[in-house]
Amino acid sequence: MVLIVDDLLKLPIDLGMKVLQAIADDADTMTLSTERAVREQVLRTQMQFEQGDIPEDDYRVKMGELRKRLDVLKGVKPRKKV
């Protein structure tokens, strides 16, 4: 009987800790591996283009935006248009 009461009392705390840990993990993923996330988006965009899911114009625009984001993350100076 005592074990059941202890488990019932700990349940909200355990769930709260799991939720907070999940939020912290998501925040770390967004801030620490942003460059990785952009690279993954580059791969997804390339696959979509190769499969014919997006037109070439959209592909070029999206890849240009992703390259700019990568440059910013790496601290590279913006590319000049020739």
Image (tube, rainbow, N blue to C red):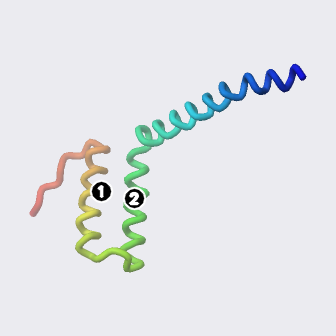
Where residue 62 sits in the image (x, y, percent)? 28, 63
Secondary structure, mark 2, is helix
Secondary structure, mark 1, is helix
Q: Quadrant of the N terminus?
A: top right
Cα distance, mark 1 to mark 2? 8 Å
Q: Looking at the image, do the residues carrying marks 1 and 2 touch, with CB atoms under 8 Å apart?
A: yes
Residue at coordinates 73% horizontally, 22% vertically from top-left? Answer: 9
Q: Picture quarter containing residue 40?
A: bottom left
In the figure, is residue 44 to the left or right of 17? left
Mark 2 = which residue? 41
Q: Which mark is residue 55?
A: none
First-in-chain label (1 vs 2)? 2
Outermost residue on the left side: it is: 82
Residue at coordinates 38% horizontally, 76% vertically from top-left? Answer: 53
Q: Quadrant of the C terminus?
A: bottom left
Where residue 24 sits in the image (x, y, percent)? 51, 33
Determine whether 22 is above or below 14 in the image. Answer: below
Q: Which mark is residue 66?
A: 1
Amino acid type at mark 2:
Gln
